[in-house]
Image (cartoon, rainbow, N blue to C red):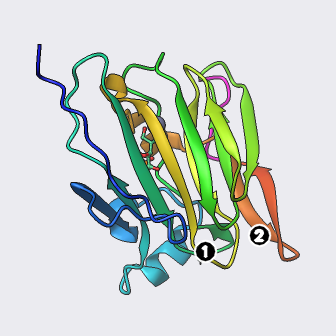
Amino acid sequence: MSFFRPYARWLDLTSGRIPEADVVTQRHLTDMRGFYADADAEAALIASNPLIYEVYCGAEFSVRAGELGFCATVMYPGKVGDEYYMSKGHFHAKPERPEIYVCLRGTGRLVMFTAEGDVDVQAMQPGTVAMIPPFWAHRTINTGVDDFAFLATFLTDAGHNYATIAEQGFPVLVVERDGQPTVIDNPRYQRDN
Ligand code: S6P
Ligand code: ZN
């Protein structure tokens, strides 16, 4: 069987980018309308449409079982209202698939939750290795003033399920209060769902 081919890519450990990535995805504010809690702040920023984050993937992935993939995410510093720039966040389409994140640059948070209502927030700084268990949705947040970057590795058949998150977000938000990242409840999230 020859349908898997070995490959290697150079990950720039300083910037967090994979310069020769086969696939680069950019997410601007218009790609995540409605994800931030403060609709007025989003409307005020939408004309300038800031780039929030970029994802560099080593290769175009198949969805065949048994393939491990890796992607590096670089997230820029900024806020929409008092909510820090963040990823859309997702469950995996195969929700039982876990994932590992390795922080390369900056400071941030990895926020996770389960459909049963458990919530977990991990602080991320260069060198932090975080495990996202099966069935936990995950989102990253740049709480610093520099770029925040991390490497993710996962079985490529994990896929993405953004629909639940697009509807009502995460149970908690990470906002700036008195200059500090602070975790607060998300008023839009229905805990009994
Ligand atoms: C894939 C992995 C990451 C994210 C990336 C962007 O399973 O978790 O590569 O895709 O950080 O986040 P999102 O929520 O927009 O896919
Ligand atoms: Zn994931």
Element class at badge 1? strand
Query: Quadrant where the N terminus lies?
Result: top left
Q: Which mark is on residue 156? A: none
Ligand 1 within 8 Å of disc 1? The answer is no
**Prevailing secondary structure of the magenta residues:** loop
What is the three-letter code of the residue carrying label 2?
Answer: Glu
Figure label count: 2
Dot 1: few (<14), some (14–19), or many (≥20) neighbours within 10 Å? some
For marks 1 and 2 on the same chain, the one whose residue lies earlier in the sequence: 1
The answer to whether the residues at label 1 and label 2 have Cβ atoms under 8 Å apart is: yes
Binning the other alpha carbons within 10 Å of mark 2 as few (below 14), some (14 to 19) or many (20 upward) gives some
Residue 39 in sight here: yes
Q: Which residue is at a point 34% across and 57% down the rendered structure image?
A: 56
Where does label 1 land, which residue?
79
Query: Where's residue 114, x and y in %?
Result: 62, 25
Is the shortest distance between ligand 1 and the CB of mark 2 under 8 Å?
no
Q: Position of residue 52 (x, y in %)?
A: 45, 70
Q: Is residue 98 left or right of residue 120?
A: left
Counting from the top left corner in percent of width and height, residue 42 is at 49, 73
Name the residue located 84 percent from the left edge and 77 percent from the top edge: 179
Q: Foreground: 29 or 43? A: 29
Residue with the mark numbered 2: 176
Q: Determine which quarter of the picture holds residue 134.
A: top right
The residue furthest top is: 1
- Magenta segment boundaries in residue numbering: 187-193
Check the image and name the residue furthest to the right: 178
The verdict on residue 75 being magenta is: no
Residue 167, image quadrant = top left
Identity of the residue drawn at 42% across and 28% down: 92
Specify whether 183 is left or right of 60: right
Q: Amino acid at mark 1?
A: Lys
Q: Position of residue 122 (x, y in %)?
A: 75, 44
